[in-house]
Amino acid sequence: MSDAARPRIPWDHSGVSDEPMLEALRALSAFIDDFEAPGFVFGEWEDSRQQEAGVWTMPYVTYGPTALAFHRAAGAHGWLRPDVDWPKWAETPEARRLIEHPAAIGTATPGQLARLLTTIIRGDRFNEGNLLNAFESGHVTAIARRAKVLADEMATAGAAEDGRG
């Protein structure tokens, strides 16, 4: 998807009637049941092996269909931010808190979720298995759970504004 086609979402805005934000949050939270299912496999490491021509492959991760769908959803809904200098952000106290303490994701803002997802997914291009490690450490599921809480809060507040709540 081109940058022009990506949703323009004010990630650090706290409006409650923002349909693109609600849709983006729901896109991430839609994966919770899969991520928490017994025996779910997000991805697996493939060992290095010698090919027919005698060339060796390096170990690499093969992501499962749900992991690939999550990656696509993150991109399609604007969670992967081209304006985030993710290597620099990853060194900030804010990032360190979210990376070193996955439970801290439970209080993250949509903007923090976007910066964290950008850092994890872009980092996977340069550090094979970064996204798999983030899933195995609980970060990816915590992001999906936090997105659900934020979506539910936003929907409830929107219903109250509309006189439905």
Image: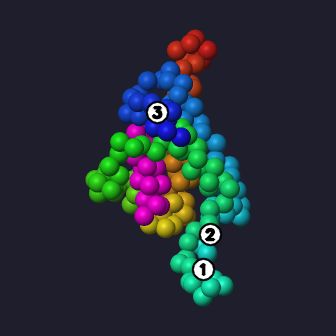
Q: Residue at x 60, y 39 (%)?
A: 27
Q: Earlier in the sequence, mark 1 or mark 3?
A: 3
Q: Is residue 109 visible to us here?
A: no
Per the image, the residue denoted by label 3 is 4
- Identify whether 139 is placed above or below 114: below
Packing grade of label 1 (10 A; few <14, some 14-19, many >=20) is: few
- Distance from label 1 to label 3 (Cα)? 39 Å
Q: Amino acid at mark 1?
A: Asp
Q: CA distance from mark 3 to mark 2?
A: 34 Å
Q: Is residue 131 magenta?
A: no
Q: How are the colours assigned in the image?
A: rainbow
Considering the whole magenta stretch, tell me its main secondary structure: helix
Q: Position of residue 12 (x, y in %)?
A: 38, 33
Residue 112: x and y in percent read 40, 43
Residue 114 in view here? yes
Front-most of 24 and 37?
24
Q: The magenta stretch spans which residues?
A: 109-126
Q: Nearer the viewer, mark 1 or mark 3?
A: 3
Q: Give the residue number, with chain letter if any, for mark 1.
A: 47
Question: Going 44% across and 66% down the picture, which residue do you hit?
Answer: 127
What residue is disc 2 on?
A: 44
Circle 2: is it few (<14), some (14-19), or many (20+) Cα within 10 Å?
few
